[in-house]
Amino acid sequence: MAKDMAGKWAQQSGAACALRVQGLTLRYQDVLALDNASACFPTGAMTAIIGPNGAGKSTFLKSVLGLEQGEGTVSAFGSPVAAAMARIAYVPQRAAVDWSFPVRVIDVVLMGCYRQTGLLGRITAQTSARAMAALERVGMQAFARRQIGALSGGQQQRVFLARALAQGADLFLLDEPFAGVDAATEAAIIDVLKSLRDTGATIIAVHHDLSTVATYFDRVLLLNRRTIAEGPVATTFTPAALAQAYGPALGGVPLLRSAP
Amino acid sequence: MDEFLLFSLPPLLIAALAAIACALPGNFLLLSRRAMLGDAMSHVVLPGIVAAFLLTGSASGAVMGAGALAAAAASALLIEAVTRRSGMEPGAAMAVVFTAMFALGVVLLETTGTAGVHLDVEHALYGNLESLIWLGGPPPELLRLALVAAGLALALRLVWRPLTLATFDPVFAQTQGVPVALLRAGLTGATALAAVAAFQAVGSILTIAMLICPAAAARLLTRSLPAQLAVSLGLAIGAAVLGTVLAGYAPLWLGLPFTLSAAGMIATVSGLMLATAALIASHRAPGTL
């Protein structure tokens, strides 16, 4: 059923999938984390992946990137994901790293240029300029030489986004980019993501705040281990679909206005 | 030749080289929260050494080094296997494997009558730094440690950027095509190599201190990785030199008719350096330096 849905969207819109996921299944010992999940993320669209806690949203992103070994077919820009990794930028959850690590903000952003500099290559003026431009885009240029341990949560998230920008990718996978950040950071991040989208990039973000889905995103993927629904926000982000993904308690309209 | 060059300089150089060889991987063990691996590696070599002696009947440094390296490699694989199969936390897996291996070593020593006759348990723990003197040529440990220290420094220079990336954010590193698992195994191998080379000269206790103390102290005093590495090497060499000199001469200066264990004194100096660094760090504003 899920497979049909992805296919239907692609047919209806005629848009090519920047990322296509078919029958993604992942087991942790006895627990089924993803159950035959399928989706098409059209090029140039901004998609929110929403669903209850434990629905496998982060696992979905990691499996797509090959960081978790799932079964199923994942292709990016028409080729296997492994061959398209240079075009994909991944922004992990902020909590995934040790922020007391002894590096500066600019060093973290330069990590996004690893594919260009390689194992032994020197960091050229061009690479540095690229990293600084990425920092400027998220409004963090003044912090370039600051230790990452001295940053606030929102600033950390912006640095992570800058690192992804420095990669020069055109498909962005973000794992809860707005979790625990201040309002200014949230606004700055959404501005950057929208401007990326407007230049043709494809954005996919795991998102928690149902109240902002409609203003931030073009499309939603409702996930609860399997694909519940996917499509444009206007037609897919409905109380009925939400009830199916989250259970009946969240189906009511008033809940859509407040954060879960 | 001068008495200093014959009797004092070789142990001093050996201590300093062992300290350098250990501090290099130690910095990255600490940052990847695998400091316990140093402890594990310096314990698991015991059964390897005893088994090598029992199999060959030779107590030469090369034979024992080979046995120690084999035991370290076997333990590293065992730790990985236990972590993967059981889903156990890596620290717990290390603790299980290294205590079992060390116990096996002690059992081998005691049941085969090797203890006290051919192999000295005390030397395994405290090393025999003082006996590594110039006897018609440099002690073999000197050359061995020089090679290991130089090799590790070169290897670290080569993989500096991917290793830093893989240590800070292994998941992101994987998306950048960094061979994270290979680097992790390489760090384990480097730790084993440093621990085995150092173990023969300075004993297992000092090896643990040398792997972690200078890096931990430097971590508290610096805010960038190159600075941390440089300071840790400085502290490592400083502790080695100061400890060796103090062990040999401090009792004399006090008019006492004996000397102290150099390995013990180096470990003590390392510990004091770490305590001082912790004191300094706690009085310093965050984010400075």
Image (tube, grey):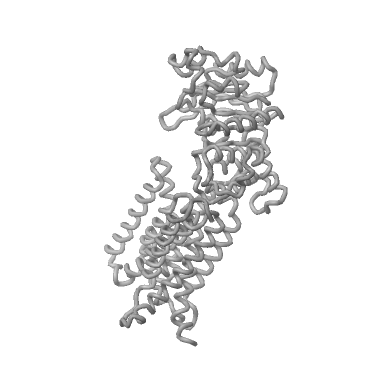
Q: Is residue B45 left or right of residue B188?
A: left
Q: Residue furthest bottom?
A: B1
Q: Where's residue A144, x and y in %?
A: 62, 47
With respect to residue B37, does B110 lie above or below?
A: below
With respect to residue A105, does B66 lie above or below?
A: below
The answer, for residue A64, to whether it is visible in the render is no
The answer, for residue A204, to whether it is visible in the render is yes
With respect to residue B147, does A157 lie above or below?
A: above
Q: Where's residue A147, x and y in %?
A: 55, 49
- Nearer to me, A260 or B200: A260
Q: Where's residue B269, x and y in %?
A: 40, 67
Q: Is residue B151 left or right of residue B121?
A: right
Tally of marks: 0
- Nearer to me, B18 or A179: A179
Q: Is residue A151 left or right of residue B196?
A: right
Q: Quadrant of residue A195?
A: top right
Q: Quadrant of residue B66?
A: bottom left
The N terminus of chain A is located in which quarter?
top right
Q: Residue at x 47, y 25 (%)?
A: A55
Q: Where's residue A234, x and y in %?
A: 60, 15
- Nearer to me, B88 or B276: B276
Q: Quadrant of residue B8?
A: bottom left
